Amino acid sequence: MWSSSVVIGTLATTMTRLSKGATFRLLLLLSVGFDRCQGELFDAAPEHIKPCAVNGKCDDGECVAFANSTASFVGNGGFYQYVSNIDADGREIGIQYAICACNYKWSKTFGSDTGKSGTDIFVRADSICKINEYELPLPEDSATPCIDKDSCHSHCNDVTFGTSDWAEAIKLPEGGYGFGAIRSKTDEDCVCAWGEERIVGCTFSSETSDAKPIVASGLVFTTAAVMGVMTLM
């Protein structure tokens, strides 16, 4: 019989050899047995999640099989986003859907180790399903000058992803709150983030090329989160 110190040492050695994503996946799996009272752990990937009965909002009707359980949008990492293929014009096609959960507890998002373009999302809840699924060409990099560095996130939402189809796709579900579908970062240019894709929304002049990532105060960040706005750090 192995001693606890040997088991812990072996686990630590194994984890140092894994990527960050694989290590986190292992920790999630190990946590399942210690957290059963908090619901089950679900993989929100397309091969595992089913469509909700009602599209457009997280409906409590999904949760009738669970006592005292209500449906809610998964506010942290609630949009599953990945590139499915390349169209005839060479444009990347993105697929996105919103995740609903019954008796939502928490979720974790991290970079994929599966080779696909997109993040892996795990949700602790009684059950999950998907709504508002879209399949659209992703915007391409733009050399349009930015108005200023503080307008980067607005530019990503309103211009880069501002076409009618994308504007509808990136809306929070009815009654939903939390982080939005698009993140942004001010670096050498204004960079819009969708899933693991990075798209130049607009460019800074030489006078603003030393722009730094936006850091929001607690008040501004809380307000932004409610509005579905997130700055990528």
Image: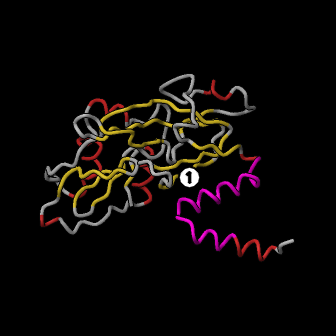
User: How many labels were placed on the picture?
Assistant: 1
What secondary structure predominates along the stretch shown in magenta? helix
160 or 207, nearer to the observer:
160
Q: Position of residue 78 (x, y in %)?
A: 50, 42
Badge 1 marks a residue whose secondary structure is strand
Q: Residue at x 37, y 37 (%)?
A: 170
Q: Quadrant of the C terminus?
A: bottom left
Q: On the image, which quarter does residue 86 sit in?
A: top left
Viewer-side residue, 177 vs 233: 233
Q: Which residues are magenta?
A: 11-36
**Rendered-image quadrant of the N terminus:** bottom right
Query: Is-magenta flag for residue 25?
Result: yes
Residue 228 picture location, percent across and down: 41, 43
Q: Could you tell me the amino acid type at mark 1?
A: Lys
- The residue wearing badge 1 is 108
Picture residue at 58% right of the left edge, 72% below the top? 16
Please tell me which residue lies in front, 27 or 232: 27
